[in-house]
Amino acid sequence: MRTQLNALRFSVRNALGFRRGPPTLLQEPKTELFDYLERGAAKRAEARERELRKRYALEPLAACSTRFDYRDNVYLLDALETIIGGETFAARVPGEALRIVDVGSKNFNYAFALERFFRNRAGPRSEVALLGVELDGHVVYRDWRARCDYAEAYVRQTENPRVAYRVADFCSIEGDSFDVATLLFPFVTRHALVRWGLPTRFFEPKRLFAKAIECTPKGSLLVLSQTESERDVLLETVATLGVDVAASVPIPSRLVHYHDALTERFGTLLRVV
Ligand SMILES: C[S@@+](CC[C@H](N)C(=O)[O-])C[C@H]1O[C@@H](n2cnc3c(N)ncnc32)[C@H](O)[C@@H]1O
């Protein structure tokens, strides 16, 4: 029943293709950002946030974001540093911008952190082109804005004209080639995809990873997993697809208020061979 309902709702959303333009992003104060933590832990989190804000030039984001979105971006930067350390990434085409594709971007509320992270790691030219691809971009929120409307606002906030968002099935995109593919919490179990509201025909993790590998020749895949067992499924799925595991580490963090729910998260860096 649930799966049939998902299929029906998905086809209606996509047939309507609802969008009404980017919303004005809300600003909330960034004082006592970690007030859900006890004093000592909150001080440590504040120090880490200051460090990341400076390193990745987060001022424009801090000046125009909700506390939730801002912490999510800070958390992502913290996780990326844990996985990748100080490593840099080179564009495959010398002299070109580093090209990154984010697979399954939802509303892309973390576009700012991704853009800043890779700009920081993109070598001397520090230029990045970032594309977010989302299958289900026409989900409508309570304020009658679509997922893709919000994505447009988050994309603009990066002030990088080479950041974009596309509503599409990633497995069907053609002709694009990238240096890095990021997959933040891709579905590797069928029940997670069904709970998210997608039709089961889109549960094709091997095809999704194979496509990500195919369009990042000699590049890197960065994958975040909700749990260690999801990480294990990921490693099984990609085992025969021509990648080396460069790192796979836990990414615990208390930089978001829902930190109790993410103690099992893992981050994995794969190199396409
Ligand atoms: C668990 S959500 C993660 C969203 C986002 N990366 C984040 O961390 O907030 C997985 C996302 O992948 C999208 N997705 C699933 N299959 C896809 C496909 N074939 N092409 C593009 N997006 C896909 C889903 O619609 C969903 O938004």
Image (tube, grey):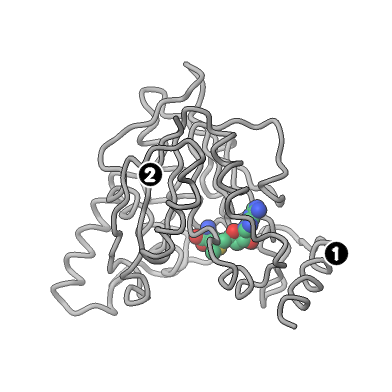
Task: Count neighbours of disc 1 (C-alpha within 10 A) and say few if under 14, some if 14 to 19, many if 20 or more.
Answer: few
User: Residue type at mark 2?
Assistant: Leu
- Ligand 1 within 8 Å of disc 2? The answer is no
x 50%, y 51%: residue: 237
The quadrant of the picture occupied by the N terminus is bottom right
Q: Give the quadrant of residue 118.
A: top left
Q: Is residue 152 visible?
A: no
Instruction: Give residue 45's position: percent from left, percent from top.
Output: 23, 65
First of labels 1, 2 by sequence position: 1
Circle 2 residue: 269
Residues under labels 1 and 2: Cα distance?
A: 37 Å
The residue lying toward the viewer, choosing from 99 and 246, is: 246
In the image, is 43 to the left or to the right of 254?
left
Residue beneath label 1, please?
16
The quarter of the rendered structure image containing the C terminus is top left
Residue 79, image x, y percentages: 33, 54
Q: Position of residue 167 (x, y in %)?
A: 71, 52
